[in-house]
Image (cartoon, coloured by chain):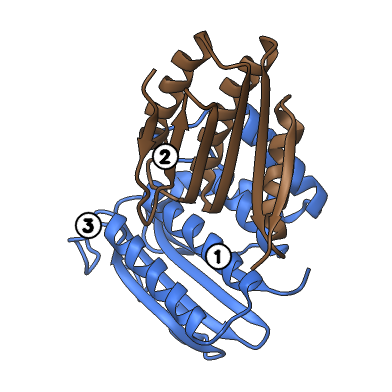
Amino acid sequence: MEPIIIEGTAKTPSVRFDANTGIFEIKGRSIPENSVEFYKPIVEWLDKYKENPLSRTEVNIKLEYFNTSSSKCILDVFKKLEAIHKAKNEVQINWYYEEDDEDMLEAGEDYESIIRVPFKMIEISD
Amino acid sequence: MGFDVESYLTEQKNGEVILYYKGNIDSEVINHVLDTVEDKLIQVNEQAKLRKKVYNVLVESLQNLYHHVDKVPSDFEDQSAEKYGLLMVKKIENGYKIITGNFIRKENIEKLEERIKRINRSSQEEIKELYKFILNHQRITNKGGGGLGLVDIARKTGNKLGYQFKDYDNEHAFFYLDILVDNSE
């Protein structure tokens, strides 16, 4: 299965999901006006990956900013990962936040409380 | 009919204006405003925590305008703007003020005001739960976050949402949202 790679822009994050290594990453800013359009190919890619996932998938979320419309799309991404986890595959979500960015830490904790996948909160110091 | 929609902003003399914009709110304008304000806050060495809060609130308030404003009345001076909005960002003593303004059809006032009142009478803990509830239960629409924007602004600032509806004509009012972003938490 081909990886999905999307270059970042001022309003959208870089995305690199590799089905050969099981390492997925979303990094940067996610503040587009139309988030659904941006996340659609990612969710579709995960639907395919879900059919035949690796035994271990590690997901690195390194967001600097995200808007509320992205927050729903990110939840959709996590729900796909939850389904993979539920099918007895190892999935781990690493949620990175910058030192002192309590809002970003809290956002990660929101997802952790909704999604049944192990989360790890990782502080990045400046 | 009508009145000078900018008067609400120009009457408030306190603070130093960092950015003022009036006109069409499109994707390019949003980019430009975000870049400008971010650059200015970095220039004055604003602490990262407050800078990020201002940025987040700006994103949500601009995208609220982008997704939700009603059309301008037919006698309004600026007919070129499909999505007409006002935005002022001010530095005040202990933080920043972000004020937006837009036309709203009168039949839409009640729903918006009810939403704001609900947020304003909630504790921070209730707002956090409300945010999670909407995130998890409301479907996303093409218009955006399904009502999360205002809740997010209240949650990130920890402050009540200031607002005012001013009658414009029989069908329209002008809505001002007045947000304080400070270090009060």
> Which image quarter: residue A74?
top right
- Please identify the residue farthest to the left as the structure is shown: B80
> Which image quarter: residue A58?
top right
Q: Residue at x 41, y 33 (%)?
A: A36
Asked which secondary structure carries label 2, the reply is helix
Left or right of B156: which side holds A21?
A: left
Residue B103 position within the rendered picture, expressed as x and y whole percent measured from the top left: 38, 58
Q: Which mark is residue B74?
A: 3
Residue B157, visible in the rendered structure: yes
Residue A109 position within the rendered picture, expressed as x and y whole percent measured from the top left: 74, 42
Q: Which residue is mark 1?
A: B164
Chain for numbered disc 2: A
Chain for numbered disc 1: B
Dot 1 and dot 3 residues touching (CB under 8 Å): no
Q: Residue at x 69, y 36 (%)?
A: A111
Q: Amino acid at mark 1?
A: Gln
Q: Which mark is residue A35?
A: 2
Above or below residue A87? Residue B177 is: below
Left or right of B73: which side holds A71?
A: right
Whole-angstrom CA distance, mark 1 to mark 3, is 22 Å
Q: Which chain is brown?
A: A
